[in-house]
Amino acid sequence: MRRMIALGALALALLAVVAAPTDSQSRPKPKPKADEKVYTADDINRRIVASLEWFCDHQGPEGQWSAKAYDSHTLRMRAAHTHNLEWVKPGEEGGDVCDEGFDKDADVPWTALALLCFLGSGHVHTDGVYKTYVAKGLGYLRSKQGSNGLIGEGHCSCVHNHAVATIALCEAFALSGDADLKPAAQKAVEYLLAAQSKESGWRYGFDDGQADTQMTSWCALAVKSAQIAGLEGDFEKSWVGTHKYLDSASADIQGTYRTGYMAGNAGGGSPRVRTAADWVSHPDSDAVNVTLRLLSGDKKWTPKSKELKGQTALLLKDLPAWADKKVDMAYLYFGTLGMHQMGDKKEFDAWKSPLLKALLENQRGWHAKDKDTFEAVLDEFGSFDAIDAWRAWGGRVWTTAMATLCLQVVARYERLK
């Protein structure tokens, strides 16, 4: 075992005890217990490996992971394709018909998220059983970087896509120490810092004078990754802007500190794509506020802060659940990061238990409707169905990546001291 700085799983600089991957690792053939209720770290790590194997078998020829075309990239040539088991079925009316996501330039963020799952378990491009997959994925991201540092195209979500890709490059550089990655990571960081709205956070475009909590969350995580990776930039100034934005989006509402989606929107509902307009709203912006305030290193914000304790109380009233029109993987991820960083074991256990139940009982291959199956006969084995609020955007690749990242926080990461 070795201790390393592991930014992987977007856990951002959390110190992780990561077993060095070896070439003796083999594809999992776990058999679930019918009465399995308590999951050990080893149990969770085996499920993480099953997710990684699904990603391996659905990587595109250029090294990308595609939310739209992953199905055509499969190596499980004789396996059945069952798609989603519940709620959102193939062929249903409304355009939200399968487990595919957007196409166009969206392969950049999905490739980055898949890479973060490998990196989160200590797998890099220079060593180990998954090195070829990681190397191809990193090569794809680098091939999409322009001379100005932007990774991907300049469409309406360019900053979000770039931020996730920046995290992947920073983490790969930090974990591997490969100097060849440093220039690309540094250019990506420089673009990200320049894209920040002056004295505020980030939104969709380059310094567009606005900010929202969703975009700021991913960009601030990228800033933290860059800091820990030892890259250069005025990170202190960037965090000042992030705090200023979060202040503008937060307020005391009937005795509880609340954060909203945009400035002046404290306590507002969750952001939603059109196809999920009727989805249950969660305190996702509150979860982001807890996470970013603690990761910033600002001494004003600690697990003892009244404001943050009030927001985690909100999360504990809205626990993870796998239910129709309730699953929101972004909420689960930032809620898991925030609760983990707060450090109260009793409270984190109260969050962790329903999280593991929701994810591990519904991972494909272990779902109640999956019987005696494995990779060769079930294409979805190891993945998670695209039934969350962002399914039309990221499809199965998104849900599988985010679920895996949540599991890695639980099983592999310590709190940032």
Image: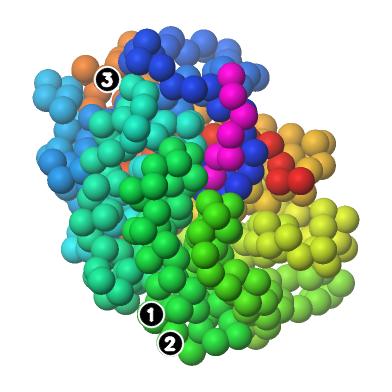
Whether residue 159 appears in this view of the structure is yes
Residue beneath disc 2: 208
- Element type at mark 3: loop
Q: Tell me: residue 351, above or below residue 158.
A: above
- Range of magenta residues: 1-7
Q: Nearer the viewer, mark 3 or mark 1?
A: 1
Amino acid at pointer 3: Glu
What whole-number distance in Å separates the C-alpha atoms at marks 3 and 1? 40 Å
Residue beneath disc 3: 375
Q: Residue at the spot x=44%, y=38% of the render?
A: 176
Which numbered disc, 2 or 3, marks the residue that appears first in the sequence? 2
Q: Nearer the viewer, mark 2 or mark 3?
A: 2
Q: Quadrant of the N terminus?
A: top right
Q: Residue at the spot x=26%, y=55% of the render?
A: 142
What whole-number distance in Å separates the C-alpha atoms at marks 2 and 3? 45 Å
Of residues 183 and 327, which is closer to you in this image? 183
Q: Are marks 2 and 1 in contact (CB under 8 Å)?
A: yes
Q: Is residue 327 left or right of residue 309?
A: left
- Element type at mark 2: loop
Residue beneath disc 1: 205
Mark 3 neighbour density, 10 Å: few (under 14) some (14–19) many (20 or more): many
Amino acid at pointer 2: Asp
Q: Residue at the spot x=27%, y=44% of the render?
A: 137
Q: Are marks 2 and 3 in contact (CB under 8 Å)?
A: no
What whole-number distance in Å separates the C-alpha atoms at marks 2 and 1? 6 Å
The quarter holding residue 158 reads bottom left
Report x, y in % for residue 270.
Answer: 55, 67
